[in-house]
Amino acid sequence: MRPVCQNCSRTWTWWDVAKHSFSIRKYIVCPYCRVKQYATKASIRFEFVVCYSIFFVFLTTYIRTDSLTPPIAVFLILFGCYQTIYPFFHRVSNTKEGLFQSFRPQ
């Protein structure tokens, strides 16, 4: 299940979401209605956990082997898998949600 625009209710293509993963912007512009869409808190947490897990596996593999070839191979495989499944777990919202937004004093 790919993201659905909260403004026009159209489902985005895999490629539209995959392109965003290489962007440094905090929002994605809907390819259909051109409205800014922001990642939900759950999507941000998912990306955080997966990215740091990949880094942890890379670091652990490097410490165990004392060579860079196996860790780089493992990193490329895991990163490729992540890039493949990322668009299916990414969700968007009209409002900007921070990871720690609920902890802010009002």
Image (cartoon, grey):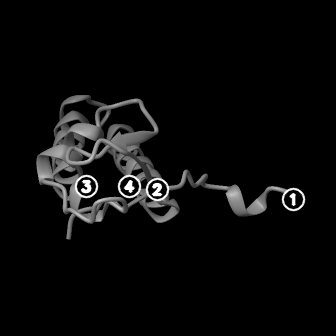
**Of the residues under marks 2 and 1, which one precedes in the sequence?**
2
Give the secondary structure at mark 1: loop
> Where residue 83 appears, x then y in whole percent?
20, 48
User: In this rendering, which labeled residue sits more in front, label 4 or label 1?
Assistant: 1
Label 1 CA crowd tier, 10 Å (few <14, some 14–19, many 20+): few
User: In this rendering, which labeled residue sits more in front, label 1 or label 3?
Assistant: 1
Task: Return the residue at label 3.
Answer: 86
> Where residue 59 appears, x then y in whole percent?
40, 40
The amino acid on which the numbered mark 3 sits, given as a three-letter code, is Tyr
The label number, if any, that marks residue 50 in the structure image: 4
Instruction: Name the foreground residue: 38 vs 83.
Output: 38
**Quadrant occupied by the N terminus:** bottom left
Residues at marks 3 and 4, CA–CA distance in whole angstroms: 10 Å
The amino acid on which the numbered mark 2 sits, given as a three-letter code, is Asn
**Of the residues under marks 3 and 4, which one precedes in the sequence?**
4
Task: Return the residue at label 1.
Answer: 106
> Where residue 57 appears, x then y in whole percent?
35, 49
Give the secondary structure at mark 3: helix
Task: Return the residue at label 2.
Answer: 94
The amino acid on which the numbered mark 1 sits, given as a three-letter code, is Gln
Q: Quadrant of residue 20?
A: top left
The amino acid on which the numbered mark 4 sits, given as a three-letter code, is Val
Give the secondary structure at mark 4: helix
**Of the residues under marks 1 and 3, which one precedes in the sequence?**
3
